[in-house]
């Protein structure tokens, strides 16, 4: 079963920016879209129309977090003549400058500023210096929880807001009193070795097989795969160098001999440059959306009836390493986890030892 797809079309309607939202019928999604300000159903297009702003696209991404999302048009457009949006832009500029000076990634800057924008829009004219802890609690209850938005989205808003409050030097609200939501205890999704084998053998294209195989065999994140260059493959030392990954950290991961042979065949056929996996046009990296399609097609062809995502391959790699006897410390280094606690979660999904435990039911 392939992952469902949501289509977000960013455009102008009568001079105003909107996002046309298309997806397969889902009553739960429809219920949540109805709570978005200004959202209306267009029967002629059979799509929902949602007024566009910076925060709207992020909110829709959260809403369709379990979907493959295709975005077209020019996102993040909004009415520049709107006085409220202009004022929020002025408030956000010091936050942007501070984050850039501290060398935050552009995606992080965008996520934090969009989260703060949503919050300040919710404040309806209140200035940042007037924000109180009660306002933050009200936002969590009346916006985040009411719309059924994820804990991850709430955490992103809190991260941005804590930094924002520190920068503007709010005398009323202490940033340390803004608490993050309690952490959810969710287990990573893992495929069996048999399912992984079926999935990796499914694509006909050598390029597609190489991409999916490299993600699994090295436990890569999606962005890490797409940012690889041929020079990052160190065949002599049997390593791959992952440059400036999450947290702006370099790391090395072991290179499988089988993957090296696959990459050599791929290189002879495609001659990629400068990216290891080029996109449709020469000199451009392969797109995230296209990579997701490659996975969806492989899942469908392998007849795996699970909502598999690319990150499942990374989770499966780590779990299979643990089951084969690799130590947690080595797995932490390979995956690039900052904390050992993140790596320890794989002990809860590993079947090593558990399958040998006999249930007392069998001896009744």
Image (spheres, grey):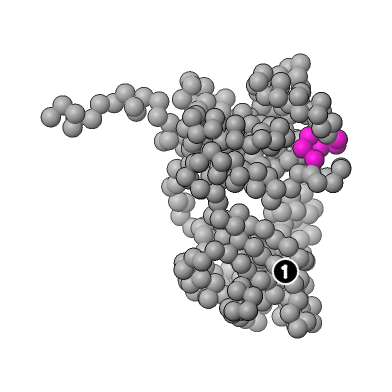
Image x and y of residue 160, in percent = 64, 60
Q: Pick the residue in front: 185 or 220.
A: 220
Classify residue 264 by image quadrant: top right
- Placement of 107 over or under 272, stated as above or below: below
The total of numbered circles placed on residues is 1
Q: Residue furthest top?
A: 236
- What's the magenta region? 273-278
Q: Is residue 272 left or right of residue 40?
A: right
Image x and y of residue 9, in percent = 70, 67
Q: Pick the residue in front: 63 or 98.
A: 63
**Which residue sits at x=77%, y=37%?**
277
Which residue is labeled 1 in the image? 10
**Which residue sits at x=48%, y=45%?**
306
**Residue 219 can be seen in this image:** no
Image x and y of residue 59, in percent = 60, 65
Q: In this view, does 263 lie to the left or right of 39?
A: right
Q: Quadrant of the C terminus?
A: top left
- Placement of 42 over or under 98, stated as above or below: below
Image x and y of residue 144, in percent = 52, 67
Q: Residues within 10 Å of mark 1 (few under 14, many from 20)?
A: many
Q: Is residue 57 left or right of residue 195?
A: right
Q: In this view, does 317 lie to the left or right of 55?
A: left
Q: Pick the residue in front: 319 or 192.
A: 192
- Placement of 23 over or under 240, stated as above or below: below
In terms of secondary structure, what is the magenta stretch mainly? loop
Q: What element carries label 1?
A: strand
**Which residue sits at x=64%, y=47%?**
292
């Amino acid at each position: 079963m392939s992952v469902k797809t949501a289509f977000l079309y960013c455009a102008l309607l009568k001079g105003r920016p909107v996002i046309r939202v298309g997806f397969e019928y889902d009553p739960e999604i429809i219920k949540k879209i109805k709570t978005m300000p200004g959202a209306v159903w267009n029967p002629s297009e059979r799509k929902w129309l949602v007024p566009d702003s910076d925060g709207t696209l992020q909110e829709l991404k959260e809403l369709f977090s379990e979907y493959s999302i295709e975005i077209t048009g020019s996102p993040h457009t909004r009415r520049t003549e709107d006085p409220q949006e202009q004022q929020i832009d002025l408030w956000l500029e010091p936050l942007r400058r501070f984050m850039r000076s501290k060398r935050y990634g552009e995606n992080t800057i965008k996520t934090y500023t969009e989260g703060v924008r949503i919050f300040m829009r919710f404040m309806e004219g209140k200035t940042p210096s007037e924000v109180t802890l009660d306002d933050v609690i009200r936002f969590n209850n009346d916006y985040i929880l009411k719309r059924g938005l994820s804990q991850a989205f709430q955490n992103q808003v809190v991260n941005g807001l804590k930094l924002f409050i520190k920068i503007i030097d709010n005398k009323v609200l202490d940033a340390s009193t803004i608490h993050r939501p309690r952490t959810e205890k969710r287990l990573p999704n893992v495929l069996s070795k048999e399912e992984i084998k079926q999935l990796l053998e499914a694509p006909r294209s050598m390029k597609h097989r190489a991409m999916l195989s490299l993600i699994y065999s090295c436990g890569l994140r999606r962005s890490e795969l797409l940012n690889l260059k041929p020079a990052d493959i160190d065949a002599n030392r049997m390593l791959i160098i992952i440059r400036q990954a999450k947290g702006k950290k370099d790391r090395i991961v072991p290179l499988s001999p089988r993957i090296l042979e696959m990459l050599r065949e791929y290189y002879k056929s495609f001659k990629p440059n400068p990216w290891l996996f080029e996109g449709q046009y020469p000199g451009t990296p392969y797109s995230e959306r296209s990579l997701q399609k490659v996975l969806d097609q492989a899942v469908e062809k392998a007849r795996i009836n699970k909502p598999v995502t690319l990150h499942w391959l990374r989770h499966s790699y780590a779990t299979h390493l643990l089951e084969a006897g690799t130590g947690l410390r080595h797995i932490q280094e390979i995956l690039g986890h900052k904390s050992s606690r993140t790596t320890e979660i794989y002990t809860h999904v590993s079947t090593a030892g558990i399958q040998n435990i006999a249930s007392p039911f069998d001896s009744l």
